[in-house]
Amino acid sequence: MPIPTEIVGSLPRPQYLQKAYADFDAGTIDKDALVAAQDKAAEDSVRKMAQTGETLLSDSEQRASSFATYPIIDTLGGAGLAQLPRLTKGPFKYKTYAYENFKKSAPYAEGTRHAMKSAVIAPSMLYLLYPLNGSVEGYSKEQFVKDLVNECEKDIRGCFEAGAKRVSIDFTEGRLASKNDSRNPWTGAELLKTFVDLNNQVLDRFSSEERANIGIHTCPGGDCDSVHSGEVPYAALLPSLFAMNAGYFLNQLASEKDKTSVYKGIGETIRRDANGVKQVAFIGVVNPLDPKVETADEVAADIVEASKYIARDQLGATDDCGFSPFSIDVKPKHVHSNKQMHFGRFWGDTYE
């Protein structure tokens, strides 16, 4: 039985695109010039990814300044994302949908004989836009949640309607929810169950056939080669992770110190019937934060070890995280190019 594989998504933006973002924020170029740079980078990503032998192609999120804020802002304004902005009035609506970016990039895959995937942000992340302990005048949290669920469903459905074969939901806040971080007061508010329930509100609007192709990605962060919750044990996230009724999960594991205990935890909590869909756990076997290129033997060893605890028909392989969640990332291009090329060659093999 072959082991299924899938990438998480993002790659570092080329220098010309990073410059275009900076120039746009500075007001020295217009939106058309920024879009032209995004088009060039997205086409290059799709074409080169096809050459590696990747199972599913992606435009590597070249059109998004941030994986977390693409629905609400065009760019990060020359800064990182230390805090999400705060909602000040309703109703909540997306400014940009992932499927709009997907539609622009999908033609680049024509003739490659490869399908494409898309990544979307989790409703649980956008839930944090609403004041934690306060309120928005004339706009209740209950109404906000209804609007949020509707917008997230629209984003996912739009990706499928535009031709995406798979849609993965970025859930990096899952592990962070179990960390009491004074810089992020919500981390001490025990929101993990709230996050899971909210994400399920969206997932449960899809059939089991659709949910088989909707995934959840979790990691402790990968922003400019840093992590926000790597010290939080996976046990704090499991089994809540697999309580979500998604069909598959992209799990950071290549950079984990005690992989075997996590494999065991996954095997014990993954479900064969999540409201009609069998869940599959894709374990991370490539670490985007480490310039060292993993060997085929190292990847195979991780998969073999994981198969001792996770049923073969519920096991897959992935990378730990996107290579560049934000547009501001000076990671050397040769690092991700070498890892991605090798990564694609792994996926061209069949692990028996």
Image (cartoon, rainbow, N blue to C red):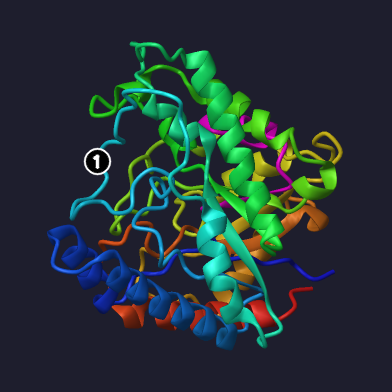
Q: Position of residue 342 (x, y in %)?
A: 52, 82
Does 348 sit left or right of 217 as displayed? Answer: right
Does 329 sit left or right of 278 as displayed? Answer: left
Q: Which residue is mark 1?
A: 82
Q: Quadrant of residue 255?
A: bottom left
Placement of the N terminus among the 4 image quadrants: bottom right
Viewer-closest of 212 and 344: 212
Q: Position of residue 88 (x, y in %)?
A: 31, 23
Q: Which residues are magenta?
A: 236-252
Q: Classify 81 as above or below 253.
A: above
Q: Quadrant of residue 203?
A: top right
Residue sitting at 44 percent across and 37 percent down? 173
Q: Position of residue 285 (x, y in %)?
A: 55, 64
Q: Quadrant of residue 6?
A: bottom right
Is residue 244 part of the magenta span, yes or no? Answer: yes
Q: How many marks?
A: 1
Residue 57 visible to an observer of this rendering: yes
Viewer-closest of 350 and 246: 246
Viewer-closest of 36 and 262: 36
Q: Position of residue 188 (x, y in %)?
A: 36, 19
Q: Classify 329 as above or below 308.
A: below
Residue 215 visible to an observer of this rendering: no
Residue sitting at 42 percent across and 83 percent down? 338
Q: Residues within 10 Å of mark 1 (few under 14, many from 20)?
A: few
Q: Amino acid at mark 1?
A: Ala
Residue sitting at 30 percent across and 62 percent down? 327
Residue sitting at 47 percent across and 15 percent down? 141
SS for dot 1: loop
Is residue 158 part of the magenta span, yes or no? Answer: no
Viewer-closest of 125 and 101: 101
